[in-house]
Image (cartoon, rainbow, N blue to C red):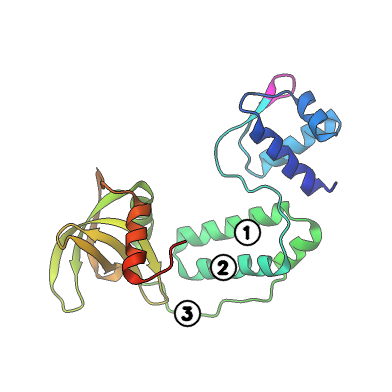
Amino acid sequence: MSRAERLLQLMQCLRRHRCPVSGATLAVELGVSLRTLYRDIASLQAQGARIDGEAGVGYVLRPGFMLPPLMFSEDEIEALVLGSRWVAARAGARLGEAARNAIAKIGAVLPADLRHELDASALLVGPGEPIAVGDQELARIRQAIRNERKLEIRYRDLQGSESTRTIWPFALGFFDRVRVVVGWCELRQAIRHFRTDQIIRLSVLDTRYPRRRQALLKDWRLSEGIPTQ
């Protein structure tokens, strides 16, 4: 068994145990020495796994995202690298940094030969438009979408007319030149699209909108003829 496979198996063992489990029990389940078990736990913790506990007390995996050691095909690696490079170049500073960090974490758990493929990918993202006007608000918009919070915006349409809207944002579209917020508009009582570069002022409200984001997204896909995932 390779080290990557062993670390993945350890993660699966920890997920099965809802209460703290001793290192000795885990070592028996994995068929490794206690010393190797402690070293593997330290390695997973260094990679971001929320494993609480210590030798002689027991270990428990706390809820939270942790990418386990995975095996990727060459096509999958190229897709990951190309996607992360596009995000880094097109999706604003915070998402760009997150994309670079994600690739670094993936690289940390790949076997040496696949890590080389990750570093040496020949797929590049060409130069595009400058960062779009309104990108400074992307982090707040994404947070509102994630938390299902209403937005109050002062919006200027392409004809120059201004209006104040309260919207329920549930999606954010990225294009080379513009970013578009998709949301239910209380004024129009319908789903509308708002370019971030046309938003004059934006406030995230404490009020949670009454429908779930997934339901709004499903309705929008049906209305646009987009296949549901």
Residue 219 appears in which quarter of the rendering?
Answer: bottom left
**Residue position marked by numbered label 2 in the rendering:** 83
- Residue at 84% across / 30% down in the picture? 35
Helix, strand or loop status at disc 3 = loop
CA–CA distance in space, label 1 to label 2: 10 Å
Camera-nearest residue between 59 and 187: 187
Classify 10 Å Cα crowding around label 3: few (below 14), some (14-19), many (20 and above).
few
Helix, strand or loop status at disc 2 = helix
User: Do the residues under discs 1 and 2 have CB atoms within 8 angstroms?
Assistant: no
Disc ID at residue 128: 3
Left or right: 168 with respect to 31? left
Tell me if residue 133 can be seen.
Answer: no
Classify 10 Å Cα crowding around label 1: few (below 14), some (14-19), many (20 and above).
some
Q: Residue flagged by tag 2: what amino acid is it? A: Gly
Badge 3 or badge 1: first in the primary sequence: 1
Badge 2 or badge 3: first in the primary sequence: 2
Which mark is nearer the camera, 2 or 3? 2
**Residue position marked by numbered label 1 in the rendering:** 103
- Which range of residues does the magenta coloring cover? 53-58
Camera-nearest residue between 120 and 174: 174
Q: Residue flagged by tag 3: what amino acid is it? A: Gly
Classify 10 Å Cα crowding around label 2: few (below 14), some (14-19), many (20 and above).
some
Left or right: 23 with respect to 225? right
Residue 59 appears in which quarter of the rendering?
Answer: top right
Disc ID at residue 164: none
Q: Residue flagged by tag 1: what amino acid is it? A: Ile
Q: Residue 36 location in percent, x, y?
A: 83, 35
